[in-house]
Amino acid sequence: MLDGNPRLNLASFVTTWMEPECDKLMMDSINKNYVDMDEYPVTTELQNRCVNMIAHLFNAPLKDGETAVGVGTVGSSEAIMLAGLAFKRKWQNKMKAQGKPYDKPNIVTGANVQVCWEKFARYFEVELKEVKLSDGYYVMNPEKAVEMVDENTICVAAILGSTLNGEFEDVKKLNDLLIVKNKETGWDTPIHVDAASGGFIAPFLYPELEWDFRLPLVKSINVSGHKYGLVYAGIGWVIWRNKEDLPDELIFHINYLGADQPTFTLNFSKGSSQVIAQYYQLIRLGYEGYKNVMENCQENARVLREGLEKTGRFNIVSKDIGVPLVAFSLKDNHKHNEFEISETLRRFGWIVPAYTMPPDAQHITVLRVVIREDFSRTLAERLVIDIVKVLHELDSLPARVNAKLAVAEEKAAASGVDIVHHKTDREWELEVAEAWKKFVTDKKKNKTSGVC
């Protein structure tokens, strides 16, 4: 009851609304264990169909009748862990075959990556080499990234939809630069695309944008089904270009559930509901349905952005091409800052995060509103109205304080008291100590016995 309203949680990319029919479908399948493939063969088939559909959406080079290589996960965090492990093992096998050290692997990525990349690096002992951001450029710079690549780089991770401002990184340019470097050095450094947010957006809004398996160095892609895949929290996907990109030794085979079952996950038991819900959405909406939803989100983001621009108080940090969100910062934050706006908006029910950018742009603070399927144009217009109210309220705070000080000064002047007296640190300490003594004494006097 005391939690925030999920529909007004504009901090999250995660889906907060699905059709009632899908709600019922998820409840009907909530008691099925995803890993019991022999007991629930149809659920397994639905997962395989989802993998194939998503692989085709990402232009995987599949032959007629060829099955895509991929797996459903709890979310993009697990998907990234699995993809990272595949890269690490392939790199280790290559270095062993060449008789070279294989104990210092690294990944090159931007400082704008999601925390799951830092988790992977720490948990699986891989150095994370981050390309620093700069003022006005809040994604990974491809040239700087390629400069940081060395013989121990297991992959370069590009982000399709930065968490900070929704911007797509230039995967095509990264691919072209990396091809040249690989040719010069004899290395074969690959690319992983973290499309957690943008994987279900780019194919529908920007079909001509080359970021996926159309680029030869892209070996794996992860995407969150529970973000713009339009499913409740708990489903992600990782797709590999072909079987050679997923080392066989990472796949386990079990038979104690009734038949030989291959498994490549960090988790084991989990519910089937999200997988079934993902299949429902893919079939229910189809290409045109997803395109309509994404275009609507894009239009509502435009309405919100224009409304904020009309106030004349904000700089828009997000880009037109990218995830449908609006990231913005105050033009003048001397009187009050973005954190105060975020805090005050909660009184209206809105959850709008404020945060600082990563190094070397940490002096920039932004507010971010994520536009999901259930965020309507009416809500966008209402949010602008409430933000304007908050600005007016915060603007009046200094005036209220100054007015009280003026009244106090007038009273002091009339009574001949010097209001400008500055207390020493010792005087403040004594005053605070006396106040606490009085507080404790009064509490003891007023203490009563009884049941609370």
Image (cartoon, rainbow, N blue to C red):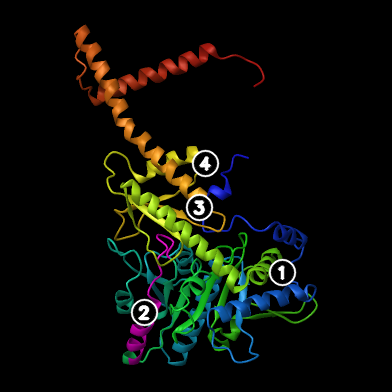
- Classed neighbour count for the residue bearing mark 4: other residues with Cα under 10 Å, few (<14), some (14–19), many (≥20): few
User: In this image, 380 relative to 176: left or right?
Assistant: right
Q: Are marks 4 and 2 in contact (CB under 8 Å)?
A: no
Q: How much space separates mark 4 and mark 2, taking CA atoms?
A: 42 Å
Q: Nearer the viewer, mark 4 or mark 2?
A: 4
378 in relation to 434, above or below: below
Callout 3 amino acid: Arg
Split into 4 quadrants, where in the image is the N terminus? top right
Q: Nearer the viewer, residue 208 or 264?
A: 208
Q: Which residue is mark 2?
A: 174
Q: How much space separates mark 2 and mark 3, taking CA atoms?
A: 36 Å
Q: Which residue is mark 3?
A: 377
- Classed neighbour count for the residue bearing mark 3: other residues with Cα under 10 Å, few (<14), some (14–19), many (≥20): some
Q: How much space separates mark 1 and mark 2, taking CA atoms?
A: 37 Å
Helix, strand or loop at label 4? It is loop
Query: In the image, is residue 168 part of the stretch drawn in magenta?
Result: yes
Closer to the chain start, of discs 3 and 4, is 4
Point out the stretch of residues depicted in magenta. Answer: 162-183
Closer to the chain start, of discs 1 and 2, is 1
Q: How much space separates mark 1 and mark 3, taking CA atoms?
A: 38 Å
Disc number for residue 34: 1
Q: Which residue is mark 4?
A: 349
Callout 2 amino acid: Leu
User: In this image, 130 relative to 332: left or right?
Assistant: right
Callout 1 amino acid: Tyr
